[in-house]
Amino acid sequence: MRRLLIYALGNEAIARGLLDAGVGVITGYPGTPSTEVLESVVRLKGDADVHVEWSVNEKVALEVAVGASWSGVRSAITMKHVGLNVASDPFMTLAYTGVGAGMVIVVADDPGCHSSQNEQDTRRYAAFAKVPCLEPSTPKEAYEMARQAPLLSEECHLPVILRPTTRVSHAKSDIELLGRLKEPTTRGHFERSPLTRVMVPAHARPAHAVLEERYAHLEDMEVPWTWLERGEGRVGIATGGVAYTYVREACERLGVKPHILKVGMYPIHSKKVLELLSSAERVLVVEELEPVIEEHIRATAQRVGWEGEIVGKPLIPITGELNVDIVEDAVASFLGLEHAHAETLSLPELPPRPPIMCAGCGHRATFYEIRKAFGKDAIFPSDIGCYTLGVSMGAVDTTLCMGASITVASGIAHTDRRSVCCTIGDSTFVHTGIPGLINAVYNGARLTVVVMDNRTTAMTGHQPHPAVGITATNEPTFCLDLAEIARACGATFVAEIDPYDVQGSIDTLKAAREHDGVSVVIARRECVILARRRGALPSRRFEVDTEACRGCRQCIEFGCPAIEFAEDSAHIGELCTGCGVCAQVCPFGAIVAKGAGKE
């Protein structure tokens, strides 16, 4: 009897594949487009003996998984592409040490920067570390690769990267399940092997030579996800990942049948490349972001003396996502065809909808209070999270990477005498903000750190972290006290505020501004989405007294989406969550609780 995973998200398919492979320890840090992998494991594992955790950052997640692998338990790690930057220190050395039981590193790339600060190509990291990288084209292939990746890892004694991209992670399709290769288990036994596990220089040098041998072997390894589709004539296309699906559709639209090399694993199978070159006089390379396939084909062609034409970048863009229309244009240009795009449904032009903070979001109130307390001349470094949207309120001047707000603020504070107030989320503070705080105190910076504590990792879908008190599987656990951590790091001014208390918060922030040293203010207010789910929103709602309203628009400038302006007066709509901050912002007392003063 066929078993199907009905209309499954690509990330859900990966989760099922890891479980069917017998992975017993799965760790990660949330980051779009990877987040649903670990969340799906929690939902799908049932009574299976699987340890699942949201780790405090990607480096920690990888190191926990390494420990499990070295104990003979198959493991996996999930993260987005920039997360591998955080984990790169152990990742690079892990290629030298090798793994024990199979280990899979799921790194979801984000071409087009849908929810990221850059477009980086994890295939470059794989080549840098000299470990295999699997790249699925569809959710079905993502399932199959995730299921087989631990076995491949054990065969080559290396961690295996699984690199879905946004369009694969968030695509949906029916998946035929192939059954369990092994039951998941957390029961293992660590075997001592200092020669391969302790990377002192005397051990690292021979380990490097072993790694080179293993990587050279990978180029000749047969895998079911790299193949050559025979076509017609003397032209070929080399492609991989989701771009393969675009190539197939573009060729169908154009009515052409070139030879197509579909790459599913890196390093690329050399024999398949040679087969393509022997069948074609001209080759088009279609891939998202970096020219990884293109460079391999050019190197192979040069090595064997192939004298045909290879076309890739810049005909294929090196930035942004590909789609069928872009690929169709490229294929037509490559083949010298005149064509018109297939008819598409004409949709009306939609108005722009830039992302904004929710109605009642405590972050909006905190940014308003920061601006009031610090003034327009202050400098406001920030970090990665929902609160990055504070840029629209003039309260975010920098955003570099996770945890960088405090350290960037320190550099500014040492070189600019203006007030510096940086913002960082509660999850990000735990992720990589704490070392920055220690550094700021130790090296005598003068700045204010505002921890935007909304009791969750909101931007990626409300995952817990150590300062929340529950685990990834919703079990109660130790709850980190952020104020005590700040004091332990050496901050000599630590205070907590409720963003909904506008004047009280401004007064506290002013005191923090005047403190000679590092001051930490924790702005604590639960994410309004979580409060709504718990039924914990205030029962009151607010309205505008149109007779008292002077049309000054300060409430509009505050930016709450529940407030509108029409007919020379503000109005509050159904999005109101009852936070009451707008009533405190209004200089004329024109915003009042509904029913106030009425019988």
Image (cartoon, rainbow, N blue to C red):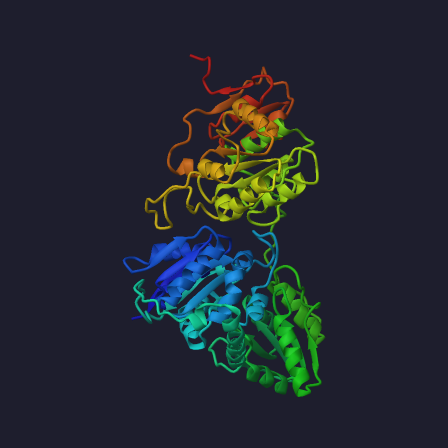
Q: Quadrant of residue 395?
A: top right
Query: Height in image: 521 above or below 175?
Result: above
Q: At x 64% / y 69%, what residue is drawn?
A: 291
Can you give x and y, in whole percent of width and height, for residue 545 in the image?
A: 55, 18
Figure quadrant of the N terminus = bottom left
Work out which residue is located at the far front of the displayed protein and give it.
202
Q: Is residue 136 visible?
A: no
Q: Quadrant of residue 128?
A: bottom right
Figure quadrant of the C terminus = top left
Can you give x and y, in whole percent of width and height, for residue 441 in the image?
A: 57, 39
424 vs 436, nearest the viewer = 436
Query: Height in image: 272 above or below 31?
Result: below
Is residue 321 shown left or right of residue 170? Answer: right
Q: Quadrant of residue 150?
A: bottom left
Q: At x 59% / y 73%, what residue is drawn?
A: 239
* Count of numbered circles on the image: 0
218 vs 553, nearest the viewer = 218
Query: Height in image: 254 above or below 51?
Result: below
Can you give x and y, in whole percent of width and height, for residue 282 in the image?
A: 68, 81
Q: Is residue 208 visible?
A: yes
Work out which residue is located at the far left of the displayed protein and give it.
47
251 vs 525, nearest the viewer = 525
Can you give x and y, in whole percent of width and height, for residue 507 in the image?
A: 56, 23
